[in-house]
Image: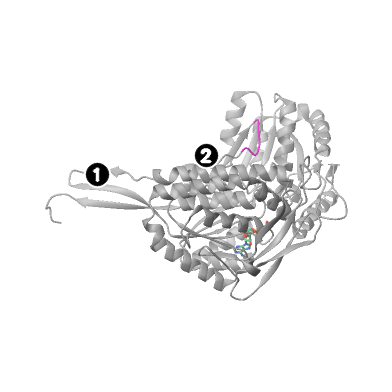
Amino acid sequence: MGDLSIKLKTPHTGEYEQPTGLFINNEWVKGVDGKTFEVINPSDESVICSVHEATEKDVDIAVAAARKAFETTWKTTTPNERGRLLTKLADLFEENTELLAAVEALDNGKSVTMAKVDIANSAGCLRYYGGWADKIEGKVIDTNAETFSYTKKEPIGVCGQIIPWNFPLLMWSWKIGPAIAAGNTVVLKSAEQTPLSALVAATLIKKAGFPPGVVNIISGFGKVAGAAISAHMDIDKVAFTGSTLVGRQIMKAAAGSNLKKVTLELGGKSPNIVFDDANIDNAISWVNFGIYFNHGQCCCAGSRIYVQDTIYDKFIQRFKERASQNKVGDPFAADTFQGPQVSQLQFDRIMSYIEDGKKAGATVETGGKRKGDKGFFIEPTIFSNVTEDMKIVQEEIFGPVCTISKFSNKEEAVKLANSTTYGLAAAVHTTNLNTALEVSNALKAGTVWVNQYNMIHWSLPFGGYKSSGIGRELGEAALDNYVQVKTVSIRLGDALF
Ligand code: ADP
């Protein structure tokens, strides 16, 4: 790979070969404009390395490669073969778990233990869609005796995929799995904060045996390469995961260019409701995991906690104790639960929300400060005495910060839970089946967890109500985003019109 790779070291795996180029047509190349950008280690703020940056011209080259593959090799590849390739890719993810997890920990800052779970779920997702590849079927639809009509599910074409930095490889797999199973080709842009694992995973694309141009992986900035993808005239579909603000821009760019199909998985401000009949030990554990998993950097983070007034005092005491025990520190230490936030920008944003909450008069129950003086670490933070109009209650913080408040009955809990513009996820903790079902039915959210949190599975659709998105990822539902339905209607006999 020459100057398109570099030897890096992680405390977990020792030395490894890190690709730094753009992966286009199964080859490593530099960007046409010769630009590179630095990748920062969030644990100590040092520069890990530089990677090549894709600009508009590189997006054009990657799209041309994806178009050519779509019209030639990929078109004649059987569904069964597509499935075999995805399954092989899943196997390679598993075989390379230690390396992939270490790169994720190095670049993103998540603990290597948690990163391994991401790799297992990435492999599971890729294998799941490998299984779907030869089961994407149309229908015969009977209308009358004179015609024979059927539908076919055809791939959409070249798909642009723009992913965030919070789950670099998991988002890579959620995007590539269904697109490839359905017969599309892909140009995927990783997030500029975390390009490294996507490039290591690109080596596995080639190793698995995908034909050139089917999956292209580029590193680059949102305003440059991301904008070029969403406005491209030869991309047929764009799939995006990220902020609601950018989601709107992508939709506008799609509408202003070739009306490419759009799916969006956006932000959230998800409610986590605890009734007084819940198993309190379990509820505390899931509420803690709901907000602090992945350092609060989850679009579905349970950031608004509502506890029934009858158990509120006991709950908050125990939750405080639990949150302050979360081990925050080095992602490569075996017992670390929470690593650094991903970047200086995210760190500053979160700290300014914390300051805003303090100024607005909310009480800091625990945390509320930076941890240490190097790296982007923030203490797990709980705010109480909040009012619904506060920014910390309404806006997505994307960090280890939650608010906790009381409710007195089911109706009030539902009203509070539904009172933001978001609707990605929600949870209810109760041992009463009626409460669980009534509240689940009333919540305006794409996923409702009962007596658990963050338990996403590749077989279960995931996506947003309201401003949390358009379309569903995962499960059979995700395939709908990557096919277009063709109706063929055949006249029988010689009837004339
Ligand atoms: P965050 O604010 O958490 O970094 P973003 O929504 O800005 O989240 O970023 C998610 C992804 O969207 C990244 O890959 C980023 O490069 C990309 N992105 C950011 N701005 C744009 C844009 N204007 N057009 C297309 N993609 C963008």
Q: Position of residue 460 (x, y in %)?
A: 53, 39
Quarter of the render that holds ligand 1: bottom right
Query: Which mark identifies residue 493?
Result: none
Q: Position of residue 496 (x, y in %)?
A: 13, 56
Specify the quadrant that holds the N terminus: bottom right
Q: Select label 1 or label 2 by which is in front.
A: 2
Say which residue label 1 marks. 143
Q: At 59% across and 44% down in the image, what residue appears?
A: 94
For the magenta stretch, what is the residue range? 451-455
At label 2, the amino acid type is Ser
Q: At 80% across and 59% down in the image, what residue appears?
A: 45
Say which residue label 2 marks. 459
Q: Nearer the viewer, residue 429 or 226?
A: 226
For residue 249, above or below residue 291:
below
At label 1, the amino acid type is Thr
Residue 417 appears in view = yes
Label the magenta part by its dominant secondary structure. Answer: loop
Query: In the figure, residue 73 lies in which quadrant?
Result: bottom left
Q: Position of residue 327 (x, y in %)?
A: 81, 41
Q: Element under label 1?
A: loop
How packed is label 1: few (under 14 Cα within 10 Å), some, or many (20 or more)? few
Query: In the figure, residue 433 lies in which quadrant?
Result: top right
Query: In the figure, residue 456 lies in which quadrant?
Result: top right
Q: Which numbered disc flags the more N-terminal residue, 1 or 2?
A: 1
